Image (cartoon, coloured by chain):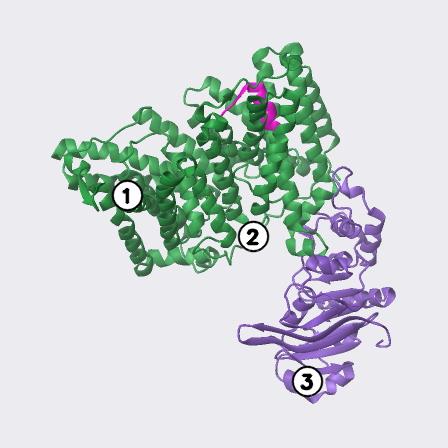
Chain colours: A green, B purple
Amino acid sequence: MDFLLVQFLTGLANASALFLIASGLTVIFGVTRVVNFAHGSFYMLGAYLAWTIVRALWDWGGREPWLFVLGLLLAALAVGAIGALVEILLLRRIYRAPELFQLLATFGAVLIVQDITLALWGPEDLPLPRPRWLRAFIEVAGERFPLYDLILIFVGPVVLGLLWLLFQRTRFGILVRAATQDREMVAALGVDQRALFTGVFFLGSALAGLGGAIVLPSQNANLQMDLAIIAEAFVVVVVGGMGSVPGAFLASLLIAEVQAFGIVLVPKATLVLVFLVMAAVLMVRPYGLLGRPQAHARAPTGSVAPVIRAAPFVLKVVGASALALAAAAPLYAGPYGLTVLIELVVFVLFAASLHLLMGPGGVVSFGHAAYFGLGAYGAALGVRFLAVPMEVGLVLAPLLAGLFGVVFGWFVVRLSGVYLAMLTLAFAQIVWAAAFQWVELTGGDNGILGVWPSPWARDKALFLWLALALCIGATVLLRRAIYAPFGYGLRAARDSELRAEAVGLNAAQLRLVAFVIAAASAGIAGGVYAYAKGSVFPTYISIPKSVDALLMVLLGGVQTVSGPIVGAVAFHGLFLTLLQWVEWWRAALGLAIVALVLAFPEGVAGFVQRRWEARFGAAS
Amino acid sequence: MSSHAPILEARGLVKRFGGVIAVDHVSLVVHAGEMLALIGPNGAGKSTCFNLLNGQLRPDAGEILLEGRSLAGLPPRAIWRLGVGRTFQITATFASMTVRENVQVALLSHHRRVWRFWRAARETFVAEADGLIAQVGMREQADRPCGVLAYGDLKRVELAIALANDPKLLLMDEPTAGMAPAERLGLMELTRHLVRERGVACLFTEHDMDVVFGHADRILVMNRGRLIAEGNAAAVRANPAVREVYLGSGATSGGH
């Protein structure tokens, strides 16, 4: 019983930090509609800056508690300023771009911040020295409980109260609430949106920075903080209802307690538990606990998807030539070249499978890596436990991925918009957590090794041809499906669900089938990748992998059928080049993403198509 | 006209929203080849009544029969399968497709050919689609995307889509809203011609009294959720209850 009380208090303490981060994220989303991946980076910067500032203050005035608090607040203000700067330099230029491009830009910022942090503070974890008063305990029902954690419990409610005052009593707060409900109307009433958005980014980032700063005494500042927290923060924001600060408060309590007791009850599945709670909440309340449907989410003008036309003859020739060139690669390329080519081929299918969902399906998945990873693990588990040959493993891959596609898709197609995207992210994190935590089955972080091709396919050239046959074959089938009646039905459901249902189409069923096809196709890609690498790891399912797929599709151009192919080749090529030649490749990649988003808001292939049609007219 | 068989029959429809009774025991019959107009001032319950008939809303009481078969509880897509075509007050078409592709999708659904993954959709039902497009006078624009069409043309495309399942019943919610006066009469002439020719039953709501009096065979007048009058144009015009409801209420037409 006493133990349960302590566990409960620990949950409350953790809830405070979670609330600080999530409240910032939810305010930013509510006003600007930006799904801000960089929020985790602000949290990480908060921890690092607090480490530097607090230590500097302590060196100057002794290890006093008030200097510690001052240091945390200064760190929060500094992060707020950085957030405002990111808004002014980057996001302000792309508010008119599709929402997903803003997301990509924020992910570019994540990569840049990662490398800057690494450059400034080095790769080691940084612990804050803990003077006696930071290590103090108090007695709670016979158990020792850290005094610092007890104080943290009150930070969340105090910040909630301050935010309430800010939103009820100040002009800025009232504008924030108004913009959360209907930002077009706020703009129409003559409010300076730019100042408002910058202010909101300052506030939200400062909250995230404070969140990172207050966990510093119990967790060291480290380079994994950003992506570790962002998934959790999204869960809290979505469970609470996007844009709702009280909702974020409730949800952070719920999630933190689930974690605190989950560690006791199901230590192997704490991560899974959190995402299951989120999925359950979204099934019962599709807009979160205190969220409301966005009544005034007006479609931006000119956002109509273009007509899909058959590829012009030139494009077919280019495609066939590229395929022939790839098939002939063993004649001119070395082993490294062939390895790169096999990866490219795999990513073309990975991107094409996501494109079916995002383009014709209108279903934005933030967690497509789940199905890629399930394919890889399907093959690897077959090898590990059943010792199946590659031929069978490559059948298991799409089967496992497709099976999970049925289960997850059944839930996903019932939601829409950002909530749908967040649910796909949650499902991907469930799969990732299982691969990471269920060591007996998956080998955990060490992965599964020894996933080798059958003897006949060990020759690189033969494996390349196998990969081409499977991946390019599947990509061609996906293309056909888009041009076939199924693809038209899918697009019909996307363009106007009202009209689609009025002509007898079952929109949810069409989307579900698309989801399963996309999952199975990604599974094939994952299976081939597993045999190409000889091993599988949880990183195949991680958030960056899902973002890779999004990047390929979006940079290629989501509304062009050839976009994902161009995007996969361009993105993976860029990635490999940077990896090989640039020391700070993350920052370089982040900058490249930001530059591409600023230069081609409709994707590279979309840009080429528009220029082509402007010059030669639309082919029909 | 009323000598024809009844296609749609509604009996005692009731719909409440909280304490408000939006539709209060409404009964109506539409016959094959008949244009039946449902009119009434704003807030009379026309749209609610309409949404009950097309499956968008569920009635709290009453029944809806299509050729004697109950439509209660069926979703819109099932109601289409039974032979009901619809046009919307605010047009709903597939913006990323051409006019012909819009009609092709409806035809693919009607012929149950949507679950095909190989053959190109644009090569299916071309002649049939072009036939429908020609009937609504959109032949020149068949290859233009719906995303760029003028509003009046979209209304025509909707009509072609609605005809794709060879319907027994057409439900048109304010078919001429947002159109220029000359276009309105053209569209209604076209609709009336198609209804007569194909023996379709057509129920429509409308604000424009010229359209109503000029094209409806029979008119139902609603006010505050109830039917207050029924009859042909002359009878409805002369009806004292109708005159009272519309007097000074902003009816748009020269008929008064």
Disc 3 sits on a residue from what chain?
Answer: B
Q: Secondary structure at mark 1?
A: helix
Task: Pick whichever of labels 1 and 2 is earlier in the sequence.
Answer: 1
Alpha-carbon span between mark 1 and mark 2: 52 Å
State whether discs 1 and 3 lie on one chain.
Answer: no
Please determine whether, in this image, residue A249 is positioned above or below residue A424. Answer: below
Q: Chain of mark 1?
A: A
The kind of residue on which mark 2 rests is Ala
* Element type at mark 2: loop
Residue placed most toward the observer, B144 or A577? A577
Residue A85 position, x and y percent, is 36, 40
Q: Chain of mark 2?
A: A
- According to the picture, the residue beneath numbered tag 3 turns out to be B242
Looking at the figure, which quarter contains the C terminus of chain B? bottom right
- Of residues A133 and A362, the one drawn nearer to the viewer in this rendering: A133
Can you identify the residue that label 1 sits on? A3
- Structural distance between the alpha carbons of marks 2 and 3: 40 Å
Please name the residue shown 76% across and 72% down the image.
B9
- In this picture, is B112 found above or below A177? above
Q: Please indicate whether residue A53 sits to the left or right of residue A167 in the image.
A: left
Residue numbers of the magenta segment: A524-537
Q: Which residue is mark 2?
A: A299
Residue A315 figure quarter: top right
Q: Which amino acid type is marked by label 1?
A: Phe
Q: Is residue A467 above or below residue A294?
A: above
Nearest to the eye among marks 1 and 3: give it.
1
- Assess disc 2: are there few (<14), some (14-19) or many (≥20) residues with their C-alpha within 10 Å of its C-alpha: few
Picture coordinates of residue B174 (x, y %)? 69, 68
Q: Quadrant of residue A175?
A: bottom left
| Residue A53: in magenta span | no
